[in-house]
Amino acid sequence: MIGLTLACIAGGSALLLNSCTDDDYWPYSPPPGWGSNYFYDTRLDGAWELVQANSSPVGKYDTNYLDFYGGGHGRYYYYRNSQPLSEDMAYYCQRSNSNTTNYQINIQYESGGASTMAYWFTDSENSLWLQWQTNGGQVVTYLYTRTGNVPW
């Protein structure tokens, strides 16, 4: 009986260790094709709350949060059906030839989605603007403000 208990404990420990190491394989370096001229903009570090989408205020369950830890690591927080959810994200910045700004950010979400957006700061780097063009040609502009923390 003691042998069976020790085997269960050892097996459980192996599962716990295995689940922790799985997170270490999350790709925090740029995937192939994203270029080699990338950098991590430390001005992004910290938590940001979406407050406007295309110049319109967003509601409580339409907002989302970007939490940049630095060095390409971060977490994306959002609501789905009024339920708070989150997922890991990796990010990389690059020089841009945009008419709006000299920088773009590439974000890879744990769920498999990816976004490339122009970005710039205003209000002493307390406001973060993200802008991209949809497949249909519509320009989308999001305004984030720096926040002390993510509410969940």
Image: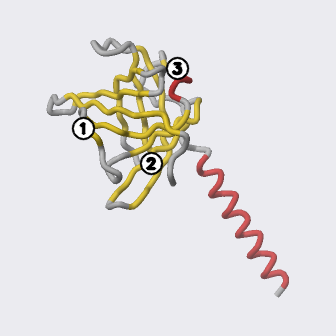
Q: Which residue is mark 3?
A: 39
Image x and y of residue 143, in percent = 35, 32
Q: Nearer the viewer, mark 2 or mark 1?
A: 1
The amino acid marked with disc number 1 is Ser
Q: Which residue is mark 2?
A: 77
Above or below, comparing residue 31 to residue 24 in the picture? above
Among numbered discs 2 and 3, the one appearing first in the sequence: 3
Above or below, comparing residue 120 to residue 112 in the picture? above
User: Nearest the camera: 39 or 70?
Assistant: 70
- Residue 102 falls in which quadrant of the image? top left
Mark 1: give few (<14), some (14-19) or many (20+) Cα within 10 Å: few
Image x and y of residue 129, in percent = 36, 27
Residue at 32% across, 61% down: 81
Q: For mark 2, give the secondary structure.
A: strand
The amino acid marked with disc number 3 is Phe
Mark 2: give few (<14), some (14-19) or many (20+) Cα within 10 Å: some
Residue at 32% across, 33% down: 142
Q: CA distance from mark 3 to mark 1?
A: 31 Å
